[in-house]
Image (tube, helix red, strand yellow):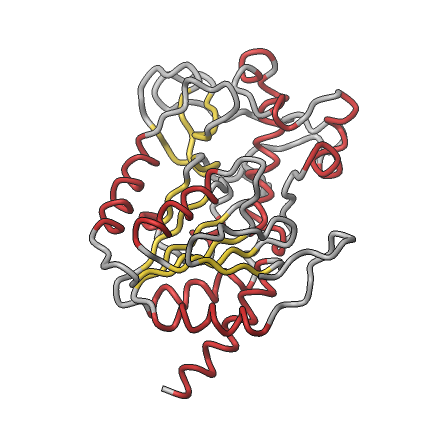
Amino acid sequence: MSSPTEAGAPAALDPHVVEKAARAIADSEALLITAGAGMGVDSGLPDFRGDRGFWRAYPAYEKRGLRFAELANPTWFDRDPKLAWGFYGHRLNLYRKTQPHEGFSILRRWAERMPRGAYVFTSNVDGQFQRAGFADDRVVEVHGSIEYLQCHALCQPRIFAAPKPVPGTDDVVPIDPGSFLASGPLPICPDCGGLARPNILMFNDGMWLTDRYAQRSDRMRGWLARMPQKKLVIVELGAGLGIPTVRLFGEQVMYVREACLLRVNPREPEVPSDGNALSLASGARAALSALDAVLETLRGER
């Protein structure tokens, strides 16, 4: 198993692990992609790792003494809607302008070649997998998606698509670059005209509407239940231990379906010792590119 260097930089990719993982992918009939915030780092997206990482991305919030967990809270939509939508609006604007890195295309090619198909299970709310060409109904977003909204007051239990950019701009929510406060019209509920909020699970959030997530999750779990043993490979990318939802889900599927799990993580690559698991201490794009090169060689041999 690969491990990080003492300085915290990724170690060189172990060619034996790369080849073994590539063979597992080539021999599988289905692919489950599980992804955390580290998957988007190679596209230039911040991963908010710790307070300092968050404040580097949003220095205005450091001046206010606001940490990510404090700001990602639905109470701000009552207390200070411009602050709340400054945070989420900037992220929505950023995610729509960000081009998914080449690793997404590699994964999509692998998925398209799988006889029994593929699913994505992710804690990311950025819509990058859909932007890279994955079918929306095959992406299970366990924390919701910034591309969908709900009424903050829950006048109706309805989830609706985020609006298009404000005319004359590239932004859905115009943001003041100095204060990171929303400076333009705030998204509204189409039913009551009141304030809308992202359909995202926030901290201390008892109002998140789960229908969209639950429907996709049920279909994915049905797909997994029909999967023959040892016919599935799980590729986990950039999922850390801070909120281990993605890691724990992949490990559970590994045990139940007797699947091979490949964990790609530059800082926390450790895997269970009692399962069929491999790890690469690497960023997502570098690992996927190395695996794809070996896969092409294997396909040429068959």
State the residue lying farthest toward the left. Answer: 226
Task: Work out whether 86 lies above or below 271.
Answer: above
Give whichever of 161, 42 is nearer the camera. Answer: 42
Pinpoint residue 21: horizontal percent, then vertical percent.
Answer: 47, 68
Decide if residue 214 is on the left or right side of residue 72: left
- Quadrant position of the N terminus in the picture: bottom right
Pinpoint residue 108: horizontal percent, then vertical percent.
Answer: 42, 63
State the residue lying farthest toward the front. Answer: 274
Decide if residue 269 is on the left or right side of residue 231: right
* Residue at 37% across, 24% down: 190
Q: How many marks?
A: 0
Give whichever of 200, 21 is nearer the camera. Answer: 21
Give whichever of 175, 43 is nearer the camera. Answer: 43
* Residue at 64% across, 54% down: 266
- Quadrant position of the C terminus in the picture: bottom left
**Residue 2, quarter of the rendered image:** bottom right
* Residue at 31% across, 19% down: 156
Task: Work out whether 252 lies above or below 103.
Answer: above
Give whichever of 103, 87 is nearer the camera. Answer: 103
* Residue at 46% across, 23% down: 196
Decide if residue 111 is on the left or right side of residue 71: left
Pinpoint residue 44: horizontal percent, then vertical percent.
Answer: 65, 52
**Residue 16, quarter of the rendered image:** bottom right
State the residue lying farthest toward the top. Answer: 79
Pinpoint residue 135: horizontal percent, then vertical percent.
Answer: 35, 54
